[in-house]
Image: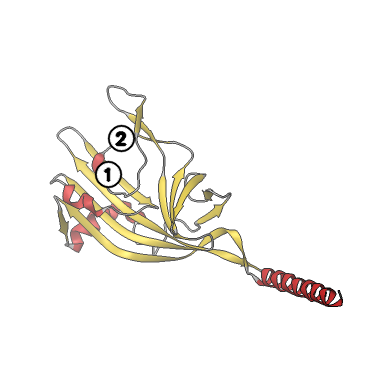
Amino acid sequence: MKLNLIYAFTGAVMCMLFMACQKENEEKQPKYTDELYRTAIIKTAGLKMYTNGSEIKDTVIINRYVKSGLKYFNFDVTPYETDCRMKFVGTDSVAFVLGYNPYTFDLNNGKYIFTSKLTINKPFNNPLLLNVFRYQAPYVPYNISSSQVVYKTQDMRVGYGNRIEMLLPVVCYKFTSRTSNSFLTAQGFALNEFDNSVIAKLGPSDTLAVQLFNYDMKAKLIE
C-alpha cells in the first residue's frame, strides 16, 4: 500500500513537471502578426521582349516599346506601390491591401493559390493575353452587344511559403496585338506566374514585354 502511494505521488509530480515544461515552451514560442508586409523586391528575370515567337534583344527597341508604361517595370528600383500587405483573416481566407479583396486560398505543400471572392469585369477576352499568366479563372461572357463583349471573372494569385514568410511572384507586362480591324494594348502587373509557353504562340502582329519579380512578404514578431 505504501509503495503504491509512493508511485502515485511520483507520477503526480512527474505530470506536474511535464505540464509546467509544456507551458513554459508554449510561452517561449515566438508569436507573429496575421499581417505580412513586403520587405524586399527580388528581380527573378530581366526585361525581355518577344514577337512572332522570337525574342527581340535590341535594347533601344525594347525601351521604346515599354516607355509609355515604364511605371509598370523595374520594381526593384522604383516599386509601383509604396505599400503591399496581406492579412490572413481565417483558416482559408486572406485580404490584400493592394488589389481586390478578399481571397480564398487552396494550400498544397507550401503553395498557395488565391482566388478572389468578388467577380471582376474585363472588357475583352484575348486568348494570347490570358496565356501570359499561369493561373486564370474562367471568363464568363455577359452584357453582349454588337460592338463589345464584357466578361466576368475572378482574380487569381499565387504564393509560396507560410503565414510568417511568403514569396509572391509578380509579372510586369505590356502586350499589344493588331488585327485587320482592331488594336489591343494592355499593360500593368499581376501577382501571378509567367507562362512562357505563350512566347511560341505570338504572331507577327503580337508583341509582349515581360519582367519578373518576387515580393518577399514577412510577418512582424510580436514582442
Asked if residue 72 lies left or right of residue 200, the reply is right
User: Which of the pair 54/105 is nearer the observer?
Assistant: 105
Q: Which quadrant would the C terminus be assigned to in this image?
A: bottom right
> In percent of the image, x 30 and y 59: which residue is there?
211
Label 1 to label 2: alpha-carbon separation: 10 Å
Up/down of 187 relative to 120, above or below = below
Quarter of image, res 193:
bottom left
Asked if residue 89 lies left or right of residue 61, the reply is right
**Mark 2 — residue?**
124
Query: For residue 5, which numbered disc appears in the image?
Result: none
Pointer 1 and pointer 2: residues touching (CB < 8 Å)? yes
> In percent of the image, x 16 and y 37: which residue is there?
179
**Mark 1 — residue?**
129
Q: Percent x, y for residue 84? A: 49, 56
Q: Looking at the picture, which amino acid does disc 1 mark?
A: Leu
User: Which of pointers 1 and 2 lies earlier in the amino acid sequence?
Assistant: 2
